[in-house]
Image (spheres, rainbow, N blue to C red):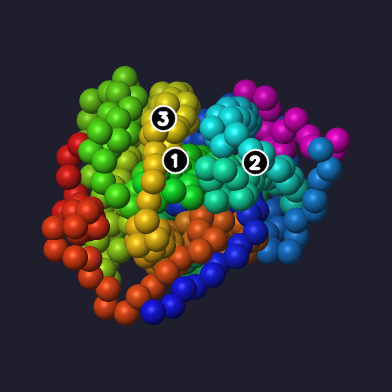
């Protein structure tokens, strides 16, 4: 029996979780033709893990999207929406914690883009919480782009083998790890991609990872996202809930990382304005879906054995992120900052040899949920 200590500095997320396929009605970027015509045909430099330039708060620009894109471009609007969401969510988390505050770290890259990370550590409620915005311009081998997506999805159509695909990506990613084992971990990521070939898509999702089962909490969390999905398309929630259950499966364990939520990717089957509004509503749902649950559970009594179970479940969290997460693959293959790519990992995790919970225990109850996903 041993404990693995994972001390990871929070950074900015370049791992933007590329995903799977849906219908496509257009290969044309939502940027206006006028803006596209104005953009100079410059070749993007490939990002590297060490090409970040720190910014002081005074030097932080209004936007990290290149000025030539235009204020009304989808690139600029997505960044603005996610920056507003970052502030809204971190304000709510800091208010709930009551002691620790978020520090801010910002940076740019030579070839354009950059990011802002906001990190809270060692709080009263949260052991580690981060919310990071990233704007990335770069290019990657077609094979790397393929490896970071669902099998069968060709995002590099028309490119020769070995030829690099210029791309733009903007995303907001967050993870919240509470101290109390009765309070669940939460993760979300919402993002927008374009390639210079004109292909675009949205992706994202919010999922929850409790160590102990409180059915009312899961009904609240899933109900909040079902209501948001239903406002846009009644098919969204059942489709994206199943997608989350399938995506967050730890295949070598035969169990899910947590109790799901919603997950979608390669979403470009309708007007981009409609998908943008859906993504915005999903970001706005994070606080009402998650914060009341943590507020209710953060002061609950717990035993040392229950804390150890939480650490074991965090070990499963680590296994999924390092072995299966496509966002990790994407970040590593696009020169992302290592600290940023691994931001979602908890500070501490635990593994025990051949551990099995006692029959009919609360631990066995939630393990059954991980092995047999439920409808909430």
Is residue 155 placed above or below 60 in the rendered structure?
A: below
Percent x, y of residue 333:
55, 65
Q: Which mark is residue 292?
A: 3
Is residue 278 among what the camera can see? Answer: yes
Q: Which of marks 3 and 1 is in front?
A: 1
Please provide the residue range marked out in magenta. Answer: 58-75
> Is label 3 in a helix, a strand or a loop?
helix
> Is label 2 in a helix, a strand or a loop?
loop
Q: In this view, does 43 lie to the left or right of 208?
A: right
Residue at the disc numbered 1: 298
Quarter of the view holding residue 338: bottom right
Quarter of the view holding residue 39: top right
Percent x, y of residue 52:
75, 56
Q: Which of marks 1 and 2 is nearer the N terminus?
A: 2
- Measured in 3D between alpha carbons, the distance from the residue under mark 3 to the one under mark 2, in whole angstroms, is 18 Å
Asked if the residue at tag 1 contacts the one at tag 3, i.e. Cβ–Cβ closer than 8 Å, the answer is no
């Amino acid at each position: 029996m041993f404990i693995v200590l994972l001390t990871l500095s929070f950074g900015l997320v370049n791992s933007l979780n590329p995903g799977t396929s849906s219908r496509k009605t257009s290969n044309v970027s939502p940027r206006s033709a006028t803006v596209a015509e104005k953009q100079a045909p410059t070749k993007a430099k490939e990002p590297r893990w060490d090409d970040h330039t720190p910014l002081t708060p005074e030097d932080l620009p209004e936007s990290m999207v290149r000025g030539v894109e235009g204020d009304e471009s989808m690139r600029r609007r997505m960044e603005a929406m996610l920056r507003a969401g970052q502030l809204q969510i971190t304000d709510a988390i800091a208010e709930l914690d009551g002691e620790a505050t978020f520090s801010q770290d910002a940076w740019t890259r030579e070839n354009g883009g950059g990011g802002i990370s906001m990190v809270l550590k060692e709080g009263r409620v949260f052991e580690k919480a981060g919310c990071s915005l990233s704007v990335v311009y770069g290019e990657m081998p077609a094979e790397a782009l393929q490896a970071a997506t669902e099998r069968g999805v060709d995002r590099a159509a028309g490119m020769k083998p070995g030829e690099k695909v210029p791309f733009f990506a903007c995303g907001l990613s967050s993870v919240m790890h509470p101290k109390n084992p009765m309070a669940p971990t939460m993760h979300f990521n919402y993002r927008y991609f374009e390639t210079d070939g004109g292909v675009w898509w949205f992706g994202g999702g919010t999922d929850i990872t409790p160590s102990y089962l409180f059915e009312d909490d899961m009904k609240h969390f899933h109900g909040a996202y079902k209501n948001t999905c239903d406002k846009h398309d009644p098919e969204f929630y059942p489709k994206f809930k199943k997608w989350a259950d399938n995506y967050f499966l730890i295949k070598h364990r035969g169990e899910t990382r947590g109790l799901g939520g919603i997950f979608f990717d390669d979403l470009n089957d309708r007007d981009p304005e409609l998908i943008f509004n859906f993504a915005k509503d999903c970001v706005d749902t994070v606080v009402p879906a998650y914060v009341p649950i943590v507020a209710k559970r953060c002061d609950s009594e717990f035993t040392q054995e229950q804390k150890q179970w939480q650490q074991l479940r965090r070990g499963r969290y680590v296994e999924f992120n390092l072995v299966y997460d496509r966002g990790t693959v994407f970040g590593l293959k696009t020169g992302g900052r290592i600290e940023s790519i691994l931001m979602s990992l908890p500070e501490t995790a635990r593994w025990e040899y051949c551990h099995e919970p006692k029959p009919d225990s609360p631990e066995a109850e939630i393990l059954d949920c991980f092995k047999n996903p439920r409808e909430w």
